[in-house]
Amino acid sequence: MKLFDRDLSWLSFNYRVLMEAMDKSVPLLERLRFIAIYSSNLDEFFRVRVANIRNIKQIDKKKINRRVDFNADELLGEIHREVSHQLNEYGNAMDEIIQNLKAKKHFICTHIDQIPPELLPELLHYFKTKVSAFLHPISLDRAENLFLDNRAIYLVVTAQSNKAFVLKIPSDKLGRFSRHQLENKTYYIFLDDVIRLHLDVLFPDLDVNQAYSIKLNKDADLQIDDEFEGNLVRKIEKQIQKRNLGVPSRFLFDLAMDNELLSKLTTKLDLSPEDIVTGGRYHNLDDFFQIQINEDELIYENRKPISVAGLDESRSILKCIEQEDYLLHFPYQSYDYVLQFFNEASVDPEVTEINVTFYRMAKDSLIGESLISAAKNGKKVSVFMEVKARFDEENNLEWARKMRGAGVKIIYSLPGLKVHAKVALVKKSHKMYGFFGTGNLNEKTSEIYCDHGLFTIHEGMTSELSNLFQHLLTKYTPPPFKHLIVSQFGAYEHFMSKIDREILHTEAGKEARIIVKVNNLQESELINKLYEASEKGVDVKLIVRSICCLIPNDNLKVKRIVDRNLEHGRVFYFHNKGNQEIYLGSADWMNRNLHRRIEVCFPITNDPMKQEILSILKFQWQDDVKGVWLSPQMRNERPKSEYGVRAQSATYEYLKINMDKEI
């Protein structure tokens, strides 16, 4: 069966993000944040995916034997055409948001002409006392080769006698915006323009003409050999240092720049024509995240986390878990319960051992601090730290060093695999307590990602989790998993067999249903099996937030939801002749998740909890406010307003009153 290209599908998803920035029903500052999210997403896409396609193109040119199922030149052409189309709408949306913020007395100045004269003395003082300390002009004429830091913004300043200089904008040191109050208005001035205003101070002997913004994206994917030999940590540390040396993947320049100057820059930077992409006056607009305005009409209504009475009323979360399982939904319910779980385990004298997997740790991780305390309190603490988590390698390594220094046993990445599971196990002499999650053990992202987490002492699940940790610690081969579905230990086969079982049921004239909710759907054999199931009469519902390589049809629809929180939980439902099976977990249905990572999916065995998950899935399937249908042409199509359901709002209200609904 034909499939969507994964990279073009991702661009379709990012356009759905842009749609939120264009949605007039979204509060203005939130629309600006979606502009920032779109910009950040696109930037990473060029640093990783486009760079990877370019690398494949070079491999093709060298006639190296590597099997790929696309033409790199054609795909790059399609990517650039789609991005160009999206950036036109992006620019229009940003202009509209900025104009509407002005009406609310918040002025984001997008040109030095928009800066009130009354602020000029204040800005001059700021430039002389702060900004100028970080400026190091480089003569473009004297530099034999020009080196630009990855993702940094620069100004190319032209002066009399065809002189030109390159200045790095120190937004990493000073922030991107200078904020000023004037009467009852607030002004946000780009650091770029603070520098533009004072070029005569920086170059007192030159007649400065213009200043143009440029930026260079480089290949940011670490090239790590996944063999057993050698020091993997040292390799990763070296590769992080080299990330700034990656080959170019996109050079953005101000469209107002003249061709002669552009030619000089591309020569100095050794760029090819396909590296060069026209941009605007400002780059790195993910810096809009730095603009904070606490005015109710400009931001989403605050949602107070829903209390879980049993956990709040008890002095011991471990004793609560001994009495019953707890299924939590973040951020609707507080992540504090997870922090309390680790905090109590670190001081409970009966706890002997704690095992945890980390994929992306919070920079100021309270969980990490709890584990350090646990080790100092004499407990055996083992942490599997994934140091190949893209863009989090350095933070994860830093935490690994800190925990190891406190006596925590640290196990690093496995050769050829990433450990993407989100699990923890606390052991007492007589009992084991498991935490199984769909999202990272990261209290910061838990505030904005929609995820699920289960606390349980289920003997079968905790025993199997203990076996998995033994595998990570010692390479021990665990017995077959009967309760958990674990990638590298039959996860792909488990999912295929469950789909086949639903096919057999529908062929026997029985009701058959499958619901799959993932971030990404790419694995071709599973996609083909879903096609087969739907063609044979199985009711298949797919909720896919981002990449979806499956092409929808009349029998097989795909819902995509983008709202104030990032949909991140993975859910797998199989009707099973009424003996409903529900699994939650960390695994998307992608090649990497099922074949090159260790993932854990866990069953929900409690009937009320099953109903809770099914109710949430129902809201998501019916969402006609923030949900769209993915079309066979890869477009995001708004559904007819049939239900008036906004899934995230409905989920919050449902959990508040714990309604009992059926999907």
Image (cartoon, rainbow, N blue to C red):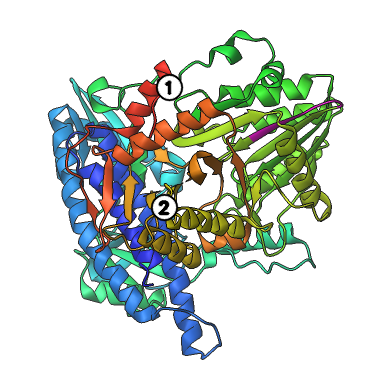
- Picture coordinates of residue 2 (x, y %)? 36, 72
- The tag earlier along the polypeptide, 1 or 2, is 2
Residue on which the image places disc 1 = 655
Neighbour tally class for label 2: few under 14, some 14-19, many 20 plus, Cα within 10 Å: few
* Element class at badge 2: loop
Q: Amino acid at mark 2?
A: Gly
- Picture coordinates of residue 284 (x, y %)? 35, 51
Q: For residue 614, what is the image quadrant?
A: top left
For residue 455, above or below residue 515: above
Which residue is the extreme one toward the bottom? 63
Q: Nearer the viewer, residue 108 or 628?
A: 628
Numbered mark located on residue 153 in the image: none
| Magenta stretch encompasses residue 395 | no
Q: Which residues are magenta?
A: 429-435
For residue 558, above or below residue 641: below
Q: For residue 256, what is the image quadrant?
A: bottom left
* Element class at badge 1: helix
Q: Amino acid at mark 1?
A: Leu
Residue on which the image places disc 2 = 509
